[in-house]
Amino acid sequence: MAGAESVSQQQLSSFYRSHHGWLHGWLRKKLGCGHHAADVAHDTFLRIIASRDVLLGMREPRAFLTTTAKRLLVDRVRRQAIEQAYLAELMLLADSSHGYPSPEETLLAVQALQQIAAALEGLAEKPREAFLRHYLDGQPHAEVAGALGVSTKMVQKYLVKALLHCRHACPALDEAQA
């Protein structure tokens, strides 16, 4: 068993050495920032390492890397959109109300949103999409069902699955409610 794991580590190491520089350069051109490119390249290789058997039978490693990196970029944009929407909402509330949230309250809310966004990354596409449409966009179940091409009962199942997934992925949110 240790021999097989050693071979796997050697494959991953070789894969990383062979493709990291190229991926980082590709991302730097795409993002215009070396620091963001390094972050996404790192996350791309982490995702690949997390899926143990990914190197077996891979014929087009750069295509696989770009696909994985593009998906991570989409996730990053979604997280930023959630953060920006929240900050914009805070600004509207601050302008319309007499009391402003403290910086600590704002920080806690942003951290909670980041935890939820991270938890949603590990969720299948349809449950994640149902969660975002219903809880972020405020769409009723029937509208979400139409957009996803499923029944309202399936939307309910997706939402339960997403909420349970968030609950398990973010135990701190559970403790905050207690």
Image: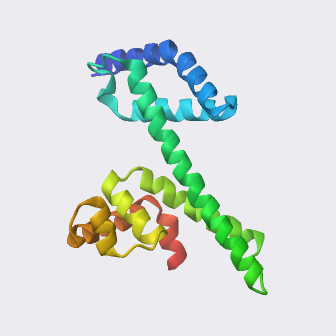
Q: How many marks?
A: 0
- Where residue 62 sits in the image (x, y, percent)? 43, 19
Residue positioned 44% across, 71% down in the render = 135
Image-based side of 115 in relation to 98, left or right: left
Residue positioned 76% across, 69% down in the render = 103
Comparing 125 with 11, the one in front is 125
Image-based side of 122 in relation to 69, left or right: left
Q: Confirm whether residue 167 shows in the render.
A: no
Residue positioned 36% across, 76% down in the render = 140
- Where residue 114 sits in the image (x, y, percent)? 57, 57
Residue 108 lies, with reference to residue 125, above or below; the image says below
Residue 29 lies, with reference to residue 40, above or below; the image says above
Comparing 39 with 49, the one in front is 39
Comparing 59 with 109, the one in front is 59
Residue positioned 48% across, 68% down in the render = 136
Q: Quadrant of the image for the N terminus?
A: top left
- Where residue 139 sits in the image (x, y, percent)? 40, 72
Q: Confirm whether residue 113 shows in the render.
A: yes
Image-based side of 175 in relation to 60, left or right: right
Residue 172 lies, with reference to residue 28, above or below; the image says below
Indicate the quadrant where residue 81 lies. bottom right
> Tell me, what colour scheme is on the image?
rainbow
Indicate the quadrant where residue 106 lies. bottom right
- Where residue 176 sits in the image (x, y, percent)? 54, 74
